[in-house]
Amino acid sequence: MPKTDDKIVHMLNDIYIYENRDLIYLKLYERKARRLSLNLTVIGPDQLKGNTRYEQFLSLYEHYSVNSVEFEVSCFARYFAIAEAHKNEDTFILSDSDIYLVNNLQHIREDTSLQGVFIGSEGFYGEGSEHQISPHFSFWNKALINSFTDYLLEVYKRNKQDHFLARHYKIQQEKIGRTAISDMTLLYMWVKEKGIPYLNSNAVGSSLGIDHNISSVYSENGIYQSFCNRKAIKLKGEAVYCKATDGMAQAMSVLHFQGEYKQVLKYFYQGRLARFYWFTISRALKRSLKSGK
């Protein structure tokens, strides 16, 4: 009979990435995942051939976003693709490709409290929640992801009748500026409307240590110290730490190199940290010169 810990590690062993681009940093991610004994599966649009639920979603989709239709639809597509690819009832992780995996990730895989709970990263700004949950490193099981794809079909059917998503888009624009009715918006609505068991991973002091966005210092219950417009990061061997403004050190399991930081993720994986820091400083100088400050 296997030990309990062995079973738990197996249950949190599967990671899925939906991607159709040839990315250097994805190859480095795959290499690190193998070092951590993770079962990483990279899938793409071929997984969706003949998927009637996804075809139904496309027939219902209305676009409200500053991003392209192709970008937003691809974000939604991954849920249908992964729902089809994951065959058992075990907990699994959905991941973006622009992620730096830290060795500290191991402790998450041994946490029994995560089973049956949707874990995503809620965005915050100076005045509170953005009412969006990022799935960039999120925890699911079969029932949860099927529930969410059902919800997507339900919401866009409803939107055909009363266009409530268009109204919500306008409200979000007025509140936070550039925005979208995206999978992140719908994840937040799904959790609230359906009473989904949910844990926010974007919180200072969380044992999860999952970074919402390397360029965002706000979290649910605190603010991180910053360095040139991004989180201040401290490295100790292969460990990675961020620190809150109250001095609390946060051991990180995952860093999310979102937006412009994608282009230097490969240097972080390769240990070429001078390039990473130079990128940060040069971007800050350019912003300063542009603003005249």
Image: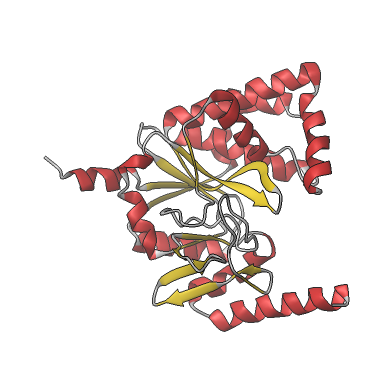
Q: How is the image coloured?
A: secondary structure
Residue at the (50%, 37%) spot, across then down:
82
Q: In this view, does 180 lie above or below 251?
A: above
Q: Quadrant of residue 63?
A: top right
Q: In which quarter of the image is residue 228?
A: bottom right
What x and y, as percent, mark residue 272?
A: 53, 80
What x and y, as percent, mark residue 31?
A: 42, 64
Left/right of residue 85 with respect to residue 171 in the rendered view: left
- For this rendering, which residue is in front, 270 or 221? 221
Q: Quadrant of the N terminus?
A: top left
- Judged from this view, the residue extending furthest toward the front is 246
Please state the total of marks drawn on the protein image. 0
Q: Quadrant of residue 279?
A: bottom right
What x and y, as percent, mark residue 126?
A: 70, 54
State whether residue 51 appears in this view. Answer: no
- For this rendering, which residue is in front, 57 or 288? 288
- For this rendering, which residue is in front, 71 or 135? 135
Q: Quadrant of the C terminus?
A: bottom right
Q: Is residue 219 above or below residue 140?
A: below
State whether residue 196 appears in this view. Answer: yes
Left/right of residue 76 with respect to residue 209 in the rendered view: right
- For this rendering, which residue is in front, 59 or 287? 287
Residue at the (57%, 49%) spot, across then down:
220
Residue at the (58%, 61%) spot, across then down:
23
- Judged from this view, the residue extending furthest toward the top is 161
Q: In this view, does 223 lie above or below 158?
A: below
Q: In this view, does 236 lie above or below 167?
A: below
Left/right of residue 31 with respect to residue 52 in the rendered view: left
What x and y, as percent, mark residue 123?
A: 63, 48
